[in-house]
Image: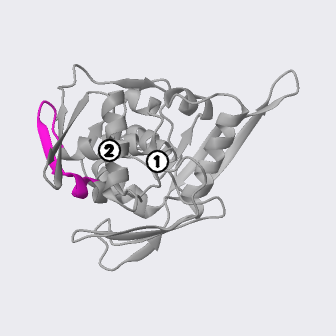
Amino acid sequence: MIEARSLGNSSAPFVADRICMRWPLFSMRKRSDFNEVFYRGEEASFRVSPSAKGVPTVWDRDVIIYITSRLTVFEAPSRTLQLCAHDFLKATRRSTGVQGYQSLMNALFRLKHSRVTTNIGRLANPATVSWIDDYSVNRRTHASGKTVMASLEVTLSEWAFHILLSDEVAPINPNYFSLTGGLERRIYELVLHCCGEGSTWTVPLRTLATDSGSTQCNLRRFKFDLKAIIAKRSLPGMSIDLFETGSDCIVRFARAPLPSLQTYQA
């Protein structure tokens, strides 16, 4: 039996693994998405098959980010972790009401039951895996008689555990969790991966659309959505410029240096 590990009352920076930043493994739709997520490139390929509640989304990814942030604290991390559901909801800026707890349960269901067929993670041959092997809920009853979710025990799959710890991590600004658009969240992570602090990254619009995992059928709509993000100036610590050169478009991202490590309280 794998020992469960708890972070206690210490604090740690929000971090995310660079492998998930690089590849569009999560759906950008807020509602349940029952379409397969498919990607094939020179460096990696994958197909995500939906569970009964759809494929994992970029909002479900918050669970992976939260777990990754905790794993980096341990000298000898375990695949099984104990999480406080209320702490997770507060840290990721979600409702702590019934809807927030239900969204967390739906996320765990999708992360367990959706299947990822991929060669990511230094696999010799494509394999079919999932993000988590299992999870369980511990509940407590208040004096009022109301039963609430107290904690969770989550066991990562060996594949997920390997990729979350096999590459370097990057700090995540807590304002990331306030982003309301799936494309906003996806582009934020992609820029974190491709653009260092205090530097710029220039990329063709078509390449950005492909690497972000956009399902738009044409670049015109993707450019429209990107312009909306530029107008909102919503990406924390980042600026975006779009240059139209004849029939082509170039996008330039710039990242400001981080003033200090951003942390969450667990």
User: What is the total number of numbered labels drawn onto the structure image?
Assistant: 2
Q: Residue at x 33, y 24 (%)?
A: 262
Horizontal side, residue 252 vs residue 50: left or right: left
Q: Does the stretch in magenta take in 196?
A: yes
**For the view shown, which residue lies furthest in the bottom direction?**
125
**Residue 129 painted magenta:** no
Q: Quadrant of residue 229?
A: top left
Please give the range of residues in magenta.
195-208
Name the residue tied to disc 2.
Answer: 187
User: What quarter of the picture does the N terminus occupy?
Assistant: bottom right
Task: Say which of 176 and 121 sits in front.
Answer: 176
Q: Where does residue 110 sit, x and y in percent of width and height? A: 58, 57
**What kind of element bears circle 2?**
helix
Residue designated by label 1? 58
Q: Say if 93 sits above or below 52 in the image.
A: above
* Amino acid on which disc 2 is placed: Ile
Query: Badge 1: how crowded within 10 Å, few (<14), some, or many (20+)?
Result: many
Of residue 229 and residue 201, the one placed in the foreground of this image is: 229
Percent position of residue 104, x then y: 61, 42
Q: Which residue is located at x 40 percent, y 58 percent?
A: 216
Amino acid carrying mark 1 in the image: Val
Above or below, comparing residue 256 to residue 3 in the picture: above
